[in-house]
């Protein structure tokens, strides 16, 4: 961890925006910190349920997130998911370390590994499957990633399904002015640095690594919510120095910027920074569907049984 590291890059654009912050700007404070419980997904691979115990209003426009692994599989241990449907939202699978294979009923998909992201807009409906490649099943190995669900507003829930293949070498990369933090911008932007992901809901998704002793102060869109999830290590948040450790999520209040410190002397602090413009619509999520009311959920199940969400390819 991580697949992409700061030592791999000599010169990067600067993403520390503290110089652009005037004295009247408001610092965000941590509203709540929760600890992700462990669970099993698909055919039995381990996950941390990152958004457990958090109100949907604080997550909006996000709905659900799993940290997959971090686990070193023995031979013949790796597992995936069977074919399953989705409707009404987008799934974002970010593979930090290891390899995963994705296929969907529209013919999309492929292999992602070591910093790659697959961005699937389920929209009106799609079937897909995620599994380790045969080589990983036979040999075993490291498996670690994130799956994030991003809601779609009601007018876009039935858009045509699509797939984005975002390679690790296409993500936006930036450093802070002290060059002790690396930011990988997968979607949205961090200052002038933009990520490759195309989104229906305005969001930003950033994987950051803070080296020991790093202190970053970052501007954040006032209208966006802010979530920070600790992938590994621990650090301090905001002026009150709230402690955030691995597998914990921080929900922040509103403001113009936020601060994060890695006070450790020999351990990196890896975090996922998420924010977006809240949709502010009713959310009814049941199993693989995220809609606005129960009738739409029932319709999704009916359409799935009729084969209207796609068919499994040969």
Image (cartoon, rainbow, N blue to C red):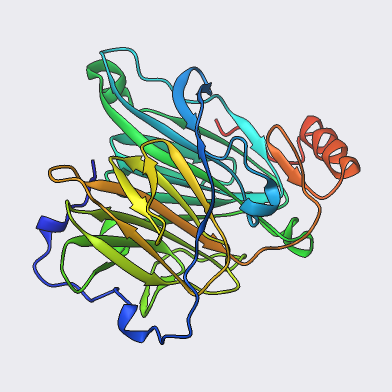
Task: Classify 240 as above or below 189.
Answer: above
Percent x, y of residue 245:
36, 39
Percent x, y of residue 22:
41, 87
Q: Can residue 111 be seen at all in this image of the molecule?
A: no
Q: Residue at x 27, y 44 (%)?
A: 114
Percent x, y of residue 228:
45, 52
Task: Classify 27 as above or below 67.
Answer: below
Q: Can residue 22 be seen at all in this image of the molecule?
A: yes
Q: Residue at x 26, y 13 (%)?
A: 75
Quarter of the picture containing the N terminus is top left
Q: Residue at x 80, y 30 (%)?
A: 305
Answer left or right for 175 relative to 17. Answer: left
- Residue 124 vs residue 8, the one in the foreground: 8
Task: Classify 93 as above or below 201.
Answer: above
Task: Classify 74 as above or below 142.
Answer: above
Give the number of marks: 0
- Residue 169 vs residue 177, the one in the foreground: 177
Kindly give the residue lying farthest to the front in the view shown. Answer: 240
Q: Residue at x 34, y 34 (%)?
A: 144
Answer left or right for 264 relative to 21. Answer: left
The quadrant in which residue 199 appears is: bottom right
Percent x, y of residue 190:
39, 72
Quarter of the picture containing the C terminus is top right
């Amino acid at each position: 961890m991580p697949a992409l590291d700061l030592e791999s890059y000599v010169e990067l654009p600067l993403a520390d925006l503290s110089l652009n912050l005037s004295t009247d700007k408001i610092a965000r404070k941590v509203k709540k910190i929760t600890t992700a419980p462990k669970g099993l997904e698909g055919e039995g691979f381990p996950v941390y349920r990152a958004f457990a115990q958090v109100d949907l209003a604080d997550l909006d426009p996000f709905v659900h997130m799993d940290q997959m692994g971090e686990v070193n599989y023995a031979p013949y241990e790796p597992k995936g998911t069977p074919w399953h449907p989705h409707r009404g939202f987008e799934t974002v699978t970010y593979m930090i370390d290891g390899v995963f294979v994705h296929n969907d009923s529209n013919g999309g998909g492929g292999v992602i590994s070591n910093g790659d992201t697959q961005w699937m807009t389920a929209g009106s409906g799609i079937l897909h499957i995620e599994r380790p490649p045969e080589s990983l099943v036979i040999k075993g190995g490291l498996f670690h990633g994130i799956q994030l669900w991003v809601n779609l507003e009601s007018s876009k829930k039935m858009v045509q399904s699509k797939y984005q293949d975002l390679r690790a070498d296409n993500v936006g990369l930036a450093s802070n002015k002290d060059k002790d933090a690396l930011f990988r911008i997968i979607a949205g932007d961090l200052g002038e640095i933009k990520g490759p992901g195309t989104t229906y809901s305005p969001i930003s998704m950033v994987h950051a690594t803070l080296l020991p002793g790093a202190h970053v102060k970052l501007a954040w869109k006032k209208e966006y919510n802010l979530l920070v999830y600790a992938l590994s290590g621990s650090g301090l948040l905001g002026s009150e120095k709230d402690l955030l450790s691995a597998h914990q999520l921080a929900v922040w209040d509103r403001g113009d910027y936020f601060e994060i410190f890695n006070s450790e002397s020999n351990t990196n602090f890896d975090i996922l920074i998420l924010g977006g413009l809240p949709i502010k619509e009713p959310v009814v999520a049941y199993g693989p569907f995220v809609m606005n009311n129960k009738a739409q959920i029932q319709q999704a199940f009916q359409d799935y049984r009729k084969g209207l969400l796609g068919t499994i390819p040969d």
